[in-house]
């Protein structure tokens, strides 16, 4: 059965202003949502990431790594987490995503997987578990796909085996859907969604002792040479 990723893009400013009771309600709603996905046989995996202010973006400039601390300039929303689900097709995946809790200002990107797999027990590994979001910047989707293809071709053996905890490559944004909020009501929008400065093309997971070690490794890779890596620790690690 095809697999899809629901990427939760959070307005962290709105989230930070939410009353504690509303935050608890949202956490409880996500717990119930996971149970509903499992009951439907759709749930594969899901994680929440630590705030973007604790993360880093790594890219190369003239052969030298550049590290940008979060929160990241020019990005109205930050990747807050994801769900990996099974569904018959994109319409079915969107229907499942429509039940995902959203805070004001959030959006949900529903993207088909091109390939990959993740370790469901990755948060149980010793050490800290980091998500690495593979980002590309291009003027149109065709150019963005070319960037992702180049990265994919040059990073097949980039992952240290003893630290690797799986990962996925996503289909282009135009093959997905986005769920946003308009006037307090949910609205479904077709892709592509290239309005962001950097667009995510995949996620992978590695175990490191610290953020500094994860960032140092990221700066040596072709991911940073051709695009960027956003390094974020998993909430539960």
Image (cartoon, rainbow, N blue to C red):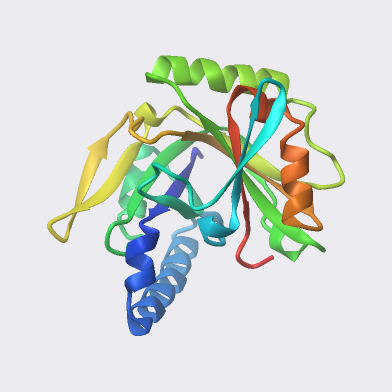
10 versus 191 height, above or below: below
Q: Quadrant of the C terminus?
A: bottom right
**At x 47% / y 66%, what residue is drawn?**
34
Examine the image and state in which quarter residue 199 appears: top left
Number of marks in the rendered image: 0
Q: Position of residue 81 (x, y in %)?
A: 50, 56
**At x 52% / y 55%, what residue is drawn?**
52
Residue farthest right in this picture: 162
Q: Position of residue 213 (x, y in %)?
A: 79, 49
Examine the image and state in which quarter residue 129 appears: bottom right
34 versus 43 height, above or below: below
Examine the image and state in which quarter residue 117 appears: top right
Nearer the observer, 127 or 162: 127
Nearer the observer, 181 or 71: 71
Q: In the rendered view, does 178 fall on the left or right side of 31?
A: left
Q: In the rendered view, does 100 fall on the left or right side of 237?
A: left
Residue farthest left in this picture: 183
Residue 138 visible in this rendered orientation of the protein: yes
**At x 46% / y 72%, what residue is drawn?**
31
Nearer the observer, 15 or 53: 53
188 versus 186 height, above or below: above
Residue 101 visible in this rendered orientation of the protein: no
Residue farthest bottom in this picture: 21
Nearer the observer, 198 or 170: 198
Q: Position of residue 121 (x, y in %)?
A: 71, 60
């Amino acid at each position: 059965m095809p697999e899809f990723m629901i990427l939760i893009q959070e307005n962290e400013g709105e989230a930070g202003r939410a009353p504690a009771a509303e935050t608890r309600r949202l956490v409880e709603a996500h717990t119930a949502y996971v149970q509903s996905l499992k009951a439907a046989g759709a749930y594969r995996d899901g994680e929440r990431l630590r705030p973007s202010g604790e993360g880093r973006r790594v890219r190369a400039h003239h052969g030298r790594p550049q590290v940008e601390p979060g929160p990241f300039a020019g990005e109205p929303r930050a990747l807050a987490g994801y769900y990996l689900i099974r569904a018959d097709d994109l319409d079915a995946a969107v229907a499942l995503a429509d039940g995902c809790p959203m805070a004001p200002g959030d959006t949900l990107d529903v993207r088909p997987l091109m390939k990959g797999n993740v370790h469901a027990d990755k948060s149980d590994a010793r050490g800290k578990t980091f998500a690495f979001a593979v980002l590309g910047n291009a003027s149109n989707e065709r150019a963005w796909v070319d960037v992702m293809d180049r990265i994919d071709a040059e990073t097949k053996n980039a992952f240290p085996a003893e630290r690797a905890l799986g990962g996925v490559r996503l289909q282009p944004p135009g093959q997905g859907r986005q769920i946003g909020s308009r006037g307090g009501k949910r609205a479904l929008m077709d892709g592509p969604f290239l309005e962001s400065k950097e667009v995510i093309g995949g996620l992978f997971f590695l175990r490191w002792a610290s953020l500094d070690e994860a960032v140092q490794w990221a700066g040596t890779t072709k991911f940073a040479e051709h695009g960027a890596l956003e390094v974020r620790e998993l909430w539960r690690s």
